[in-house]
Structure formats: C-alpha cells, structure tokens
Image (cartoon, rainbow, N blue to C red):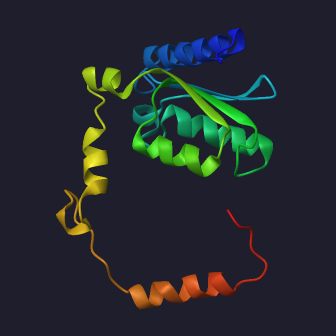
Amino acid sequence: MISERDSYFIKRAIQLAEEGMKSNAGGPFGAVIVKNDKIIAEGFNQVTSSNDPTAHAEVVAIRKACDKLKSFQLEDCIVYTSCEPCPMCLGAIYWARPKAVFYACTKEDAAAIGFDDHFIYEEIEKDIENRRIKFINMERAEGVKVFEQWAKKEEKTEY
C-alpha cells in the first residue's frame, strides 16, 4: 500500500532529479534512501559533472547511505527514485538489499527522452563472444587461485 509518506519521498526524488538537471550535473534522475521513515541519503545523477559513468542517482544515494550506516547493505531501507532503475542501478540495488524500491517514471519514459538502456538487457542475453564490446578471457588459472584462497579463508565477511 502506498502511503502519504511514500508520496512525500518520491516527490523529493523527483525534486532532486530536477535540481541535478538544472545544475547541469547530469541527467534528470534523483534518488532518496529512507530508513525508519527518515531520509538518510539523497543523490542525483552526476555522470557528466563528475566524468563518472557510474554516478547515477541511485548509486550516488546508495554510496552515501552505506557510508552513513557504516554498512555495505541497506537493511530495512527503502529506495525512492525518480525513474525505474537502469540495469547497473538495479544490480547495485540488489547488492545493497533494501526492502523495497518505489519509482516514478518507467524505463519506457526514459527511453522516450534518449535514455534507452534496452540494448544492455539485450547484451546480457547474448553469448559473450557476440557482444558489442569484445570480452577476452585470459590468465583464468591465475585468477582462480585467488578465488580458491577466498573459498578457504576462514575470517571473511560474506555478502
């Protein structure tokens, strides 16, 4: 069920999208992370202003929230975002493990203004040798040795 508080938080995410866009920080996207009914982190797209292709609103907000919580997971948090997350942000959200995501615009709305990430979903489905960007597997045996060490490591933080 969507509450008045949910509406307040999504409107804040939309406001952040507008602020970021007007300041020329990046595209028109904003995100808010809430825990215990309080905003703990906010972000807007900063891709072009920071020259960081990962500086999407959700990633910016997740980084801030995790720093504030001193945790790599957003336990009992809710993400409010001005647009349905792209594949990268979707991955970051799943790794952060919030309990819910609310969004305003859809990925189709984003595609209509030039932010179309459908090709990424298509690329994921392709065999690795058929992707647009060449992926070359090498030194796997050396890399696997580190994985084997991790598997045997007793004092590690699982995630």
How far across and how far down the image is residue 140, in percent?
A: 40, 85
Between 77 and 132, which is closer to the camera in this rendering? 77
Please name the residue shown 68% across and 38% down the image.
Answer: 99
**For the point 63% across and 47% down, which residue is it?**
96
Q: Position of residue 32 (x, y in %)?
A: 63, 26
Q: Quadrant of the N terminus?
A: top right
Q: Position of residue 9 (x, y in %)?
A: 65, 17
Work out whether residue 54 can be spotted.
no
Q: Is residue 9 left or right of residue 47?
A: right
Compare residues 130 and 27 and report the one nearer the observer: 130
Q: Quadrant of residue 88?
A: top left
Q: Is residue 47 above or below residue 121?
A: above
The quarter in which the C terminus is drawn is: bottom right
Q: Quadrant of residue 37?
A: top right
Q: State the count of labels.
A: 0
Q: Is residue 87 above or below residue 33?
A: below
Is 10 left, or right, of 64 in this rendering?
left
Residue 155 in percent (x, y) is at 79, 78
Q: Residue at x 27, y 68 (%)?
A: 135
Q: Is residue 110 above or below residue 155?
A: above
Query: Quick one: 114 or 118, which is closer to the camera?
Result: 118
Q: Is residue 156 among the parts visible in the rendering?
A: yes
